[in-house]
Image (spheres, coloured by chain):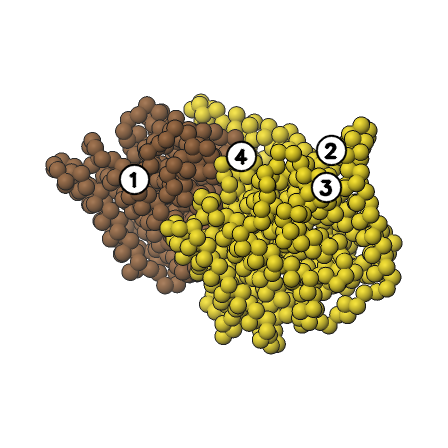
Chain colours: A brown, B yellow
Amino acid sequence: MEILFAAAFLALLADIAGGAVKRYGPGLVVASAIASSLAVLGLDWPSSLGAVVQLQPVAEPFAALYVVDRYTTFTAFTALVVGLAVVAYSVRFFDSGRRGSFYALFSILMCTLMGVVSAGDLLTLFLFWEGMTVSAYGLVTFGRAQLSMEAGIKYFFMAGIGSLLALYGVAAIYFSSGSILIQSVGVSLSSSFGQLGVAILLLGLGVEAAVVPLHTWLPDVYSASPIPTASVVSGAVTGVAVFGIFKVVQPLVPGGGYLPAGLPLGGGVAAIELILAALALLTMFVGNLSALVQGNLRRMLSFSSVAQTGYMLAALSTMSVPGLVAAVFAVWNHGLLKSNFFMAIGRRGSTIEGSELDGLRGAGRTDRAFGFVFASSSLAMMGAPPFGMFWSEILVVQALLIAGSASGAIFYLLAAAVVVNIVMSIGYYFRIINTVVFGEAAAGQPPQPRLDLVPSVSLLVLSLVTGIVPFVILGKVL
Amino acid sequence: MIYAAWLSWLLPLVGVPFAAIAARRSGRAGGWFAVAFSGGSMAAAFYSAISLGPPATEGFTTWFPPLGVTLQVQVDQLSVLVAAFVSFVSFLVVVYSLGYMKDEPGLARYYSLVLLFIGSMMGLVMSGNLVQFYFFWEVMGVCSALLIAFWSDRPAARRAGMKAFVVTRLGDSALLIAVVFVAVTFGTTSFAAILGPGGIPSLGTGAIFALGLLMFIGSMGKSAQVPLHVWLPDAMEGPTTVSALIHAATMVNAGVFLMLRMYPIIVLPQLSGSLVDVVLAVGLLSALVGGACALAADDIKRVLAYSTISQLGLMFAAIGLGGLAAAAYQMISQGLFKALSFLAAGSVITAVGTREIDKLGGLAKALKFTYAGFLVSILAMAGLPPLVGFWSKDAILTSAMTSGFLQTAAVLVVFAFTSLYGFRLLFRVFHGPVPGGAKAPSEPPASMLVPIGALTVSVLGAWYVIQAQPFLSSESWLPDAYALASSLAVLGVSLAAAYFVFLVGHRKMASMVSADRGLAGLRDFLHDGLWFDRAYGALYDGALRPLASAVSRLQTGLVEGNTALLLLAVGALFVLFALGVL
């Protein structure tokens, strides 16, 4: 985290310099910072699932500050991989103007994402969450196009209210349990005031994770912000935001790292379970139904992300270890693919008009490489093998069926809803293939430079690896 | 190690990038790479069949830890039989592609997808557990959809690809739930374990029925059974090679194959025949619907597609009637003669440039070789002894006769339909007057004629080899005299009827049907596939689309509205807590 933070300053410094340093310096600094963070992560991968290691860099009476376990490491890994690809992409994307501040903000964003992922108490979580919102807001409005400003304001407004709610939830949890440690969530559930606090906290975090009905900022941000921002927000920020919900759920799950395995679910958990299940159902249906009728590619992708959040919530609502694993794995698969998708759209879709499906008609015909990436990404997002998403959908269904056999019909219903929604998503993803890749080519657009596709293809290849040899990736979190 | 079994499906998969790279340089080179890899796969599959010992399963490495899945092959009588058949047809179709697809653009995509398909189909047949089976099942679906849309400049082809994917995935959803349920319940999905006494049979009756039904719904999607059959006629927009390989001979059999694998479950005594009856009913219904629609279709490939639906229905009916071996035999016979019909049809399309029956006629003289192949395939489909197709049909009829009057009648009507549409196609395409303005046809190149020849020979004589295979050899295939007499009588009558209706008196009959409102309505009803498509279209336009638009309109994008939604959510939460609901 410190590496990333320092990189932000270096990026700003490099921006002041001239020539090649100005052009590539900031990007390189941030890229190497992310790469070294990845290396540190790789060297220090927690060896056993059960252990949640609490770290207290500063001796302080009631906070753990950071925790490390396999889930946090895996999610941090996901965010860093996506971040690295997006930085690599940005270096070519922003080829003029001042971009030092972009990389600085980007670096701070990565830093706050790491903070959110590894927060050990609710206050730390909240602080990094705010940092994440602010830096993401800066990235959304970067370039100051009018639409992105509007999207940014909407985002900031919604996220602000969300944070406010979350803070209220944290306060309520502290009031009812006397602690702000993550595991105090479980304690606070014993009183109904505490339950309300947890529910409000989830709702507050749900804004950023695009849980329906709090998702309304997301289509605007995905469709109006600069492409690199859209890539990182869709691939890393939304995923980490779901992980925020994960962090609240984790201490309630027996065997999830805080509670020993085999315990029955604690009192009050059922209410949270029900809220999450209902929100999951609503989120996936609203996401997919809305995506079906979109005419703009980026808005379509954003509603697809909403639907994906629904699947992840469904997995989390099971309050079980398979559910936790499924959610984290889904964050990984969705992060890779969605970020890859936005980078593949690239410059031609950097404006709202440019990303209309009809405007992109036949683009894959004139630009074969682009068409190939697009077709593969669409297939991958439909959950078709041999891409990773296939397995994460299976894992979500698995978690739901296990929960269904233990506690009844509601989870069977959710499992059915998930598979129905997957079929629905084929409707619009195949439409993307049929329009963009197979459609009759409109006026000849120049092909994108091949190098622009490298970061997106790397993420696609990672997804393919996850699909063909799933044990390599899953072994890191199981 | 059972090397041959591994190689039979890994080879085509390994070949995918090679064929793609080679085909980018020259389409022909890509084609030869594909021939080599599919040939290798065939050799391996044949070796597995010849050297078959006791059933063996072999796996290595935990492929997908959460479901306890290992990557494995299962070598037994059923898998080697089907693998040998699949690889044989695949190889011939790839050879045929050398000529048929010669000057097409996009051959890198074509050959890589075909090889990916072959590898997946072989992987599916050889797999030893349900998850691996489902993985390849889905990969095949992807290949199938993309190959249907291969001529992507045709909007109809693009739509057909999408339709195939959506409709089959509907069925797959049911299968997915079944697969994961099995994995969750037993901690393994290996066929040996789940079919054994500690596996699915140990569950309650309701659970077994639900599981079997979910798997059967998956089969219905893949094997185009009513009401999930609507994608197959449209799939004919793909290249004819693809129709022959995927949509006639191999992939559409995957559903039947799944039911064959799961046979011990669907006949469990505690179900008291309920599941078997479902399979029988759906099979017979599809056989009748497919046969009836084939009578009125006016595109040579659509007739064959409806015929495939009908024949697949017969296979499910065979399973429903308890004829496991008959279903497998029918699957292989249908694969051979239908692949032959399609390849012959492909050479007609190459020669004349159209698929519409009304614009075809009198081709027998110019395309002698093709005609011979087509004639043999139609005779086999109609069940003329001793061609392949005869033996299994007769076995199905025999078991229907022991089962009941209704079943017997339905099977006989299906036989009559089969002969009628088969001979209709033969007479209308190869006999009768040559339509004016048609270009002078000529036989296709050798690369297309050789596979047609090889398939003709196997349709004529392969019954001898097929019946000797261990999976089928335990049955007696000698026909029951009563069944033989009935099926031959049906064949004779239908042939005569087809001769008069579709050849001699064709013009008269056509104008008579057009003049009569009732008959014309019936013809159009059959021609439009019994309006299944219209019903689905109405469902989409009337329900899903308005719902999606309404949901979309709810999200106004205005900050006030968004905030109101958020506050509403918080308010709802408070109310729920205050009321004590949560």
Element type at marker 1?
A: loop
Q: Which residue is mark 3?
A: B432
Q: How many marks?
A: 4
Label 4 and label 2: CA atoms lie apart by: 24 Å
Mark 3 Cα shell of 10 Å, populated few (<14), some (14-19), many (≥20): some
Q: Earlier in the sequence, mark 3 or mark 4?
A: 4
The reply to whether residue A398 is visible in this rendering is no
Label 1 and label 3: CA atoms lie apart by: 58 Å
Q: Which residue is located at x 23 percent, y 45 percent?
A: A30
As displayed, is residue B140 above or below residue A303?
below
Taking depth in this image into account, of B105 and A143 the one nearest to the observer is B105
Q: Which mark is residue B524?
A: 2
Measured as percent of width and height from the top left, residue A361 is found at 44, 32
Write down the chain letter for disc 4.
Answer: B
The reply to whether residue A35 is visible in this rendering is yes
Q: Which mark is residue A385?
A: none
Write down the chain letter for disc 2.
Answer: B
Nearer the camera: disc 1 or disc 3: 3
Taking depth in this image into account, of A460 and A54 the one nearest to the observer is A460
Q: Which residue is mark 4?
A: B155
